[in-house]
């Protein structure tokens, strides 16, 4: 689809007039053809103003998608005039042809609607004008069932990782079966309850770890957001859970959810400690399943995507694993060797710096937003990067966006170091850091999800 937009001002020397009202149809067709020659990376223009749209989600109509020569331009223009009034072009390097399209432009906070329209029109992607990025729309509609395991209540990247899952559900890219909070404390589960309600999924079950590690370090103390009040002392954010006892024990929620799913159908996104996962693996038969925890995972889980690990030349403890080292060692000991594990090391997310002022600006469409509230009233300028969303994106979108290591096995040392041994039969891989363009594109993608209403 679109890879760059043109400015009409650049075309002044190429066009006999700068208003469509002063161009004959023949001149307009010639100008559009010339644009295709001058801008092989693509363009989109508004036929009414002959200017580029500065924002919006650009999607092509199926009716004009096979228009790839000069003779096809009049039909594209006629379609655009009777529909939304936008014409674009793009070069397909696979067959060496330049295509012209009639386009529709959606507001940038309507990604789900734009993607649905693109899929209905057989388009491979949509183009985000203000961010100059593509978003894939021709993804295979897989039955992706996700359980999120998060240490909610400390780093704000957990908030954005969960937000990504809600937006993926809006686009029907996955189903979030449940959220397990592996950081002890009712307030941390209450945060998830607030987010479930805010994003329109109030019935997603929440599990809470109650026998994990005491008082792990908190980087940003946002545990009070569930109890925020208006100036009239009314709750600022809607809730579903009124009694903390309603939160299931974390590993029990795992067992209930896994037991009810088809074999090898569940993907786990682990973006915190592995305390609850270790307890799941150590668990025995119960009212939900006659299987042990290890057998339940082996039978029901297809893969786990874990934020953590230090690989390459560096040998040093990983934060998530070293904070709860006894649980982590048990997790690595018991995790079934038949179930894939993909690690997202911190260095992959280090360049993704979502600045507090940018977060607030991206959420200016509402005054009552739990993530915005956190960034407005707390100090979030703590070196926070978008580490956790990278595991979630990989879990839902697959490996296409990532460069991954060869297969191997990972051993955890008592200091929390992750030692990778290559082996084609291994169950483990890890993400490599991307270049600046890749990191910038992924951050723009996260920001795009943040502005959705």
Image (tube, rainbow, N blue to C red):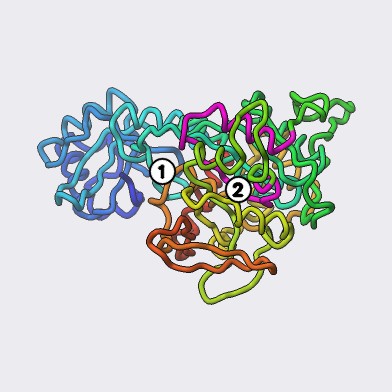
Position above or below: 31 against 85:
below
- Whether 275 is among the magenta residues is yes
Q: Could you tell whether 89 is left or right of 338 in the image?
A: left
- Of residues 120 and 272, the one nearer the viewer is 272
Q: How many marks?
A: 2
Q: Which residues are magenta?
A: 249-278
- Of residues 365 and 37, the one nearer the viewer is 365
Question: What's the CA distance linking mark 1 and mark 2?
Answer: 25 Å
Q: Which residue is mark 1?
A: 135
The location of residue 66, given as percent across then percent down, is 17, 35
- Of residues 182 and 114, the one nearer the viewer is 182
Residue furthest bottom as drawn: 313
Task: Give me the residue at 34% from left, 30% from top.
Answer: 119
Neighbour class for label 1 at 10 Å: few (<14), some, many (≥20)?
Answer: some
Q: Could you tell whether 192 is left or right of 111 in the image?
A: right
In the picture, the disc for residue 270 is 2
- Residue 230 is at least partly visible in this image: yes
Q: Earlier in the sequence, mark 1 or mark 2?
A: 1
């Amino acid at each position: 689809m679109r890879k760059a937009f043109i400015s009409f001002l650049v075309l002044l020397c190429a066009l006999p007039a700068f208003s469509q009202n002063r161009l004959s149809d023949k001149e307009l067709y010639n100008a559009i053809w010339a644009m295709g020659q001058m801008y092989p990376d693509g363009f989109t223009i508004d036929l009414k103003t002959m200017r580029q749209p500065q924002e919006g989600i650009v999607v092509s109509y199926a009716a004009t998608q096979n228009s790839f020569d000069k003779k096809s331009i009049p039909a594209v223009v006629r379609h655009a005039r009777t529909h939304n009034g936008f014409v674009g072009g793009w070069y397909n390097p696979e067959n060496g042809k330049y295509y012209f399209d009639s386009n529709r432009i959606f507001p940038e906070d309507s990604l789900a609607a734009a993607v649905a329209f693109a899929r209905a029109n057989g388009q491979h992607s949509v183009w985000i004008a203000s961010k100059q990025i593509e978003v894939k729309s021709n993804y295979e509609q897989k039955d992706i069932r996700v359980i999120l395991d998060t240490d909610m209540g400390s780093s704000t990247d957990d908030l954005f990782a969960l937000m990504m899952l809600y937006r993926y559900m809006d686009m029907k890219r996955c189903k979030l079966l449940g959220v397990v909070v592996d950081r002890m404390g009712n307030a941390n589960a209450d945060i998830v309850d607030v987010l479930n309600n805010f994003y329109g999924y109030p019935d997603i079950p929440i599990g809470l770890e109650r026998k994990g590690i005491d008082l792990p370090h908190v980087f940003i103390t946002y545990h009070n957001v569930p109890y925020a009040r208006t100036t009239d002392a009314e709750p600022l954010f809607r809730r579903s859970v009124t009694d903390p006892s309603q939160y299931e024990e974390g590993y029990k929620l795992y067992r209930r959810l896994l037991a009810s799913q088809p074999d090898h159908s569940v993907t786990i996104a682990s973006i915190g400690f592995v305390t609850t996962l270790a307890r799941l693996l150590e668990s025995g038969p119960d009212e939900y399943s006659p299987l042990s925890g290890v057998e339940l995972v082996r039978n029901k889980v297809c893969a786990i995507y874990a934020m953590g690990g230090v690989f390459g030349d560096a040998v040093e403890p990983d934060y998530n694993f070293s904070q709860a080292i006894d649980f982590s060692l048990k997790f690595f000991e018991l995790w079934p060797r038949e179930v894939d594990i993909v690690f997202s090391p911190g260095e992959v997310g280090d360049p993704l710096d979502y600045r507090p002022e940018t977060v607030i600006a991206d959420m200016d469409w509402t005054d009552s937003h739990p993530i915005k509230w956190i960034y407005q009233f707390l100090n979030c300028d703590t070196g926070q990067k978008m580490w956790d969303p990278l595991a979630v994106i990989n879990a839902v979108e697959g490996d296409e966006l990532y460069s991954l290591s060869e297969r191997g096995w990972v051993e955890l040392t008592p200091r929390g170091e992750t030692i990778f041994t290559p082996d084609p039969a291994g169950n483990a891989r890890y993400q490599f850091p991307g270049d600046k363009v890749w990191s910038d594109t992924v951050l723009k993608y996260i920001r795009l999800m943040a502005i959705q209403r």
